[in-house]
């Protein structure tokens, strides 16, 4: 996913000499192609994320379209005040690319887990937030944000992310993408965790439990039209995210549904509970530990189905 993003950014930079890339001593083996081709528009500012955000804001004020690249929560939570005051308050054309969303850097512990940054940045005016599930959604998000003159954020995987879509698939990343629909139970997933939902739905449908599935690449502004449409006709919506359930994707879905009148679906949020992770391990291992794996999703839906 991150390789696809940098490749696409290089293609855009060839057409637009105002595109610049800032890194924080990271991205080795990923951003080199961009550096080699556009050395005068790529800056490594070291481990100094607050300065990265402020310098990006200054460059944007001079007319540049700045992309800030970093690992996990470093280009977001470490410089949250600068994103708020310098970038969002002035509605500047700065895009943040964070690689290693969720538990992608699971072996490095909670300091490298990007599991709260959506909730932290969601209230900021003008900020648009994307959690793509695979390289196709990621490149789509980059293209949309390139044409948006304002702050944006794309949460990327670490690499080797599962490809959900076929090469010829055309999708609109500003809207929810429908894979299956159900008048009973629908899963709404955002981010690379969609791969777990795809596995779960396949298993459930083989068992005769016709579960629906939607991907939400864009978290803000979220596709309220699809949420409302599905909530009007089904019994249960389950949101799945590799992020805290407090203030994340699931919260946005719940807020939308709670504001509806009349009959609507119940919303069950699956994500990280109100606690820090206390174990380390691979992304797959941590997903299982914290109950957001495909197995956990299957069990949850089977219990709902049996009780009904």
Image: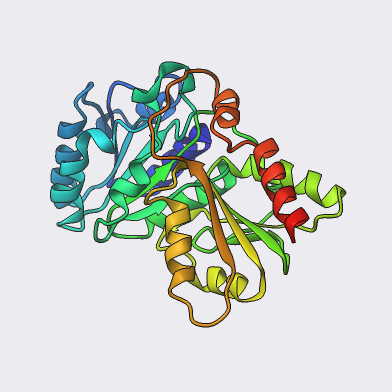
In the displayed structure, would residue 262 be above or below residue 236?
Answer: below
Using the rendered view, name the quadrant where residue 69 is placed: top left
The scheme the figure's colours follow is rainbow
In the displayed structure, would residue 24 be above or below residue 145?
Answer: above
| Residue 102 % position (x, y) | 46, 34
| Residue 218 vs residue 252, the one in the foreground | 252
| Residue 20 vs residue 121, the one in the foreground | 121
Give the quadrant of the C terminus. bottom right
| Residue 17 vs residue 225, the one in the foreground | 225
Residue at 54% from the left image edge and 73% from the top image edge: 228
In the displayed structure, would residue 193 be above or below residue 234?
Answer: above
| Residue 189 % position (x, y) | 57, 51
Count numbered badges in the picture: 0
Residue at 68% from the left image edge and 47% from the top image edge: 165
Q: Is residue 136 left or right of residue 105?
A: right
Residue at 40% from the left image edge and 37% from the top image edge: 115
Camera sees residue 168: no
Report the residue that reaches farthest toward the bottom. 262
Q: Is residue 203 left or right of residue 225?
A: right
Report the residue that reaches farthest toward the front. 307
| Residue 122 % position (x, y) | 32, 54
| Residue 209 % position (x, y) | 81, 55
Camera sees residue 88: yes
């Amino acid at each position: 996913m991150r390789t696809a993003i940098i490749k696409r950014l290089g293609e855009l930079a060839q057409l637009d000499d105002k595109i610049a890339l800032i890194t924080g001593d990271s991205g080795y083996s990923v951003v080199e192609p961009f550096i080699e081709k556009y050395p005068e528009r790529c800056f490594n500012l070291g481990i100094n994320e607050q300065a990265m955000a402020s310098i990006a804001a200054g460059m944007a004020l001079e007319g540049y379209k700045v992309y800030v690249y970093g690992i996990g929560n470093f280009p977001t939570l470490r410089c949250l005040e600068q994103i708020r005051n310098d970038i969002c308050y002035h509605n500047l054309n700065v895009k943040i690319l964070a690689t290693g969303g969720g538990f992608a850097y699971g072996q490095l512990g909670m300091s490298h887990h990007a599991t709260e940054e959506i909730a932290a940045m969601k209230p900021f005016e003008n900020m648009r937030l994307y959690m793509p599930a695979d390289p196709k959604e990621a490149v789509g998000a980059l293209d949309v944000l390139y044409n948006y003159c304002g702050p944006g954020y794309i949460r990327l995987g670490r690499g080797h992310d599962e490809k959900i879509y076929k090469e010829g698939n055309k999708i609109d990343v500003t809207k929810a993408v429908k894979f299956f629909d159900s008048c009973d139970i629908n899963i709404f997933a955002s981010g690379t965790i969609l791969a777990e939902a795809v596995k779960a739905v396949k298993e459930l449908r083989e068992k005769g439990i016709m579960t629906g599935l939607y991907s939400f690449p864009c978290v803000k502004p979220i596709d309220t039209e699809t949420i409302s449409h599905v909530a009007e006709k089904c019994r249960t919506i389950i949101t799945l995210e590799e992020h805290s359930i407090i203030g994340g994707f699931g919260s946005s879905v719940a807020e939308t549904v709670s504001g509806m009148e009349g009959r609507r679906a119940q919303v069950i949020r699956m994500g990280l509970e109100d606690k820090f992770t206390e174990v380390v391990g691979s992304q797959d291992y941590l997903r299982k530990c914290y109950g957001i794996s495909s197995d956990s999703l299957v069990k949850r839906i089977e219990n709902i189905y049996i009780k009904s």
